[in-house]
Image: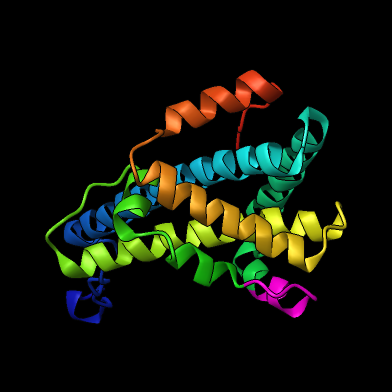
Amino acid sequence: MSNKLVRKKKNKPKYGWMQDEIDALARKDARDRQLAGYGVTMANHALEIGFWVLHDKFGFGKKRLNRMMDCINAYLVAEYNEELNIRQLPLALQKMKVQVDVCAEAKKVPQRCRLKMAEMDRMNNPNEFKTRMYVITEALSVTYAMICTELVTREKISGAKICEFMNECTAFINDYLDGGWVCQEDIRYQLEKETGVKVVLK
């Protein structure tokens, strides 16, 4: 057969990832993990404060706090399994007969104290700083929402008591934690010492 009659093989384009695209995805993944880490740290510290307030001001003991810890971890597992969107809890809480806005309460905590609670350093890039502040503020409000939802649904706490709880949390953070009278380690130590409860998120 003549070479002229042989069908020429076309060079098929190679559809693959370019190295710069791979690097960009790696940077985005690393950034997302870092932001998630700040959110988890904020949630841990907010829970420790919330549990301490429930114990100190409302008389919650080991059994009730451990039950609440189990329920909050159940929320997180459901979120991981895509069975629940915990970011909708603040809105759902507003639709209940509870006159409390956890998002507004979270913003009552000064920025410097939110940074301290999330163990985050302030940065010069305003856009990145705004993004990080959004992440940790959302983590604080969602943590508040998980606690308040359990107080309403399982503990049958009234709306007035929920508002009192939120006011006590905000006052404790602003007066004691932000004022430098206590640190997060002090709160954790006293909570474990007096109740035997340790905050562990799954």
Describe residue 162's horizontal placement relative to residue 175 as left or right: right
Closest to the observer: 33 or 170? Answer: 170
Which residue is depicted at the point 61% across and 32% down?
A: 200
Q: Quick check: is 94 in the magenta stretch?
A: yes
Describe residue 17's horizontal placement relative to residue 198 as left or right: left
Quadrant, the N terminus = bottom left
Give the vertical position of 153 relative to 192 (above or below).
Answer: below
Which residue is depicted at the point 75% across and 66% down?
A: 160
Q: Which residue lies furthest to the left in this view?
A: 124
Protein image colouring:
rainbow
Give the vertical position of 9 relative to 187 (above or below).
Answer: below
Q: Where is residue 83 in the image (x, y as percent from the top left)?
A: 73, 61
Which segment is the magenta one?
A: 91-100
Q: Position of residue 74 (x, y in %)?
A: 74, 46
Q: Quick check: is 76 in the magenta stretch?
A: no
Give the vertical position of 52 relative to 76 (above or below).
Answer: above
Q: Position of residue 171 (x, y in %)?
A: 50, 53
**Residue 117 visible in the shown view:** yes
Describe residue 154's horizontal placement relative to residue 201 as left or right: right
Q: Quadrant of residue 5?
A: bottom left
Q: Where is residue 84 in the image (x, y as percent from the top left)?
A: 71, 62
Closest to the observer: 65 or 162? Answer: 162
**Residue 14 visible in the shown view:** no
Which residue is depicted at the point 59% across and 66% down?
A: 87
Q: Quadrant of residue 32?
A: bottom left
Quadrant, the C terminus = top right
Q: In which quarter of the image is residue 146?
A: bottom right
Closest to the observer: 167 or 110? Answer: 167
Describe residue 40's horizontal placement relative to residue 142 as left or right: left
